[in-house]
Image: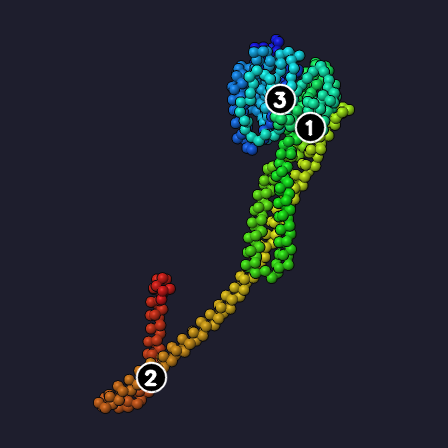
């Protein structure tokens, strides 16, 4: 099969991924009927390879010969020619957050009538439900060598408002109502009086229109979650304002239990706000670059209004003006709220630390007083011990002197000692020395035993 006269077919197809516009300019023709659908990936890193396998499955289901297909990491193409000469072209593209399918039906005869709705390529049916959340669905009809008036456009395009203009600075017209039809597809009608001019500009025009639709819907996709989050953020802001007011009034006389209760409540709210912040950042952070992509493509469209409709730029600006700014303002609010919670929690933790320091200082004062009391008691015990030891020496000396007196009397009766009273008096100092020696020996022995005992035995004792 030759896709272009004088072209080697597959060799040219392998260059399609390098420049889609060149591919479209080289292989697409007019008239044409195009179905475009985009799907958002929840986990692009995992789902992008899956979408690639899904497209390979689509090529197999459409019975497209592998020699007329090209598969790269993020783009794929396949071409099939029907029995009647009509051409079916399937295109897959994977982007940062979404991937898209385009299926083109190009009839073999330029005079063959085309209409909105299902593609009329022989036996064509899209075989499965693609992966991901559907972002948009477009039904684009490209008709050369004719013109449409307002009444005809109103019949072909459903919806209350018509948007129509000349584009790309040429005599090429685009009309749509941005209203889904009975097949849940937005209809676009593209026409021009010059088929050659339309064929030359078609690839770029299709890229601009699908890019505008894809990124406009991606910007608006998280809007319901944004609306719910606005209410949640406002509730947290009011709650935190009340908490800060209460804490400011009661902080100086707050007890430990009160501080603990405040910290538990604030920590719970802080975690909830952190979860909300992470969710919003994931959903809304890409809105600013997407908004820039939409605006740059509206400028690239180079619209000139037709007398019976508003321009496409009017619709896109009406849909997204202020949306990305609103997303960023909400992100700023929730991030500021998160910082407010951190600040309040830090103040309470500082208060708790100050109370703990006061308790530690008071405990240190008590310990100092206790140590002073123990020192005084120890000194008193030492004085008392010395007093007792002194009295013990006197008592022992008294009893020893008494016993010696009886001994001296007995010796006197036996005639062995003449003056027993003198001997008793002389023995008294000796008794004192002996008593002191006994007391000292006993105290030293006790201390040695205590020192020799193991620590556990000492503690137990």
In the image, residue 439 lies at what x, y percent? 35, 75
The quadrant of the picture occupied by the C terminus is: bottom left
Cβ–Cβ below 8 Å for labels 3 and 2? no
- The percent coordinates of residue 428 (x first, y second) are 33, 84
Residue 119, by quadrant, is top right
Locate residue 174, reporting x and y percent. 71, 22
Task: Return the residue at label 1.
Answer: 159
Q: Assign the N terminus to one quadrant of the image.
A: top right
Instruction: Give the mark nearest the N terminus, 3 or 2.
Output: 3
Q: Which residue is drawn at 61% across and 8% down?
A: 6
Where 275 falls versus 422 (above or below)? above
Which of the two discs, 1 and 2, sits closer to the camera? 1
Q: Could you say whether the residue bearing mark 3 is in a helix, strand or loop?
A: loop
User: Which comes sooner in the sequence, label 1 or label 3?
Assistant: 3
Instruction: Compare residues 439 and 354 and report the one nearer the observer.
Output: 354
In the rendered image of this protein, does residue 413 appear above or below residue 113?
Answer: below
Residue located beneath label 3 in the image: 117
- Residue labelled with disc 2: 398
Image-quadrant location for residue 35: top right
Give the SS element for disc 2.
helix
């Amino acid at each position: 099969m030759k896709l272009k006269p004088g072209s080697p077919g597959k060799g040219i197809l392998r260059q399609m991924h390098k420049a889609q516009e060149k591919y479209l300019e080289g292989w697409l023709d007019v008239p044409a009927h195009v179905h475009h659908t985009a799907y958002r990936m929840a986990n692009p890193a995992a789902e992008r390879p899956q979408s690639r396998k899904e497209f390979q499955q689509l090529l197999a289901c459409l019975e497209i010969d592998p020699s007329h297909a090209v598969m790269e990491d993020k783009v794929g193409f396949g071409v099939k020619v029907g029995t009647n000469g009509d051409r079916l072209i399937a295109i897959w593209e994977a982007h940062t957050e979404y991937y898209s399918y385009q299926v083109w039906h190009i009839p073999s005869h330029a005079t063959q009538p085309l209409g909105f709705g299902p593609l009329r390529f022989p036996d064509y049916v899209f075989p499965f439900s693609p992966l991901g959340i559907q972002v948009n669905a477009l039904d684009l009809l490209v008709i050369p060598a004719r013109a449409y008036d307002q009444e005809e456009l109103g019949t072909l395009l459903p919806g209350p408002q018509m948007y129509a203009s000349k584009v790309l600075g040429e005599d090429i017209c685009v009309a749509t109502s941005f209203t889904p039809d009975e097949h849940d597809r937005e209809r676009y009608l593209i026409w021009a009086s010059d088929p050659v001019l339309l064929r030359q500009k078609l690839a770029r025009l299709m890229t601009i229109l699908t890019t505008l639709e894809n990124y406009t819907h991606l910007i608006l996709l998280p809007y319901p979650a944004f609306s719910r989050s606005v209410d949640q953020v406002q509730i947290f802001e009011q709650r935190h304002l009340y908490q800060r007011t209460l804490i400011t009034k009661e902080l100086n006389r707050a007890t430990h239990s009160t501080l603990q209760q405040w910290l538990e409540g604030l920590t719970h709210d802080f975690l909830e706000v952190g979860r909300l912040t992470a969710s919003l950042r994931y959903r809304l952070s890409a809105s600013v670059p997407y908004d820039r992509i939409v605006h740059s493509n509206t400028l690239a469209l180079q619209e000139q209004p037709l007398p019976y409709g508003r321009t496409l730029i009017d619709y896109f600006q009406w849909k997204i003006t202020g949306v990305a700014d609103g997303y960023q303002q909400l992100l700023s609010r929730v991030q500021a709220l998160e910082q407010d919670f951190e600040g309040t929690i830090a103040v309470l933790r500082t208060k708790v630390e100050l109370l703990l320091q006061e308790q530690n200082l008071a405990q240190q004062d008590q310990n100092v007083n206790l140590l002073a009391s123990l020192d005084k008691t120890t000194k008193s015990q030492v004085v008392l011990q010395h007093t007792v030891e002194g009295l013990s020496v006197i008592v022992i000396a008294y009893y020893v002197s008494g016993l010696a007196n009886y001994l001296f009397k007995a010796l006197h009766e036996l005639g062995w000692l003449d003056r027993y009273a003198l001997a008793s008096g002389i023995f008294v100092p000796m008794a004192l020395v002996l008593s002191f020696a006994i007391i000292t020996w006993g105290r030293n022995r006790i201390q040695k035993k205590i020192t020799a005992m193991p620590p556990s035995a000492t503690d137990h004792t």
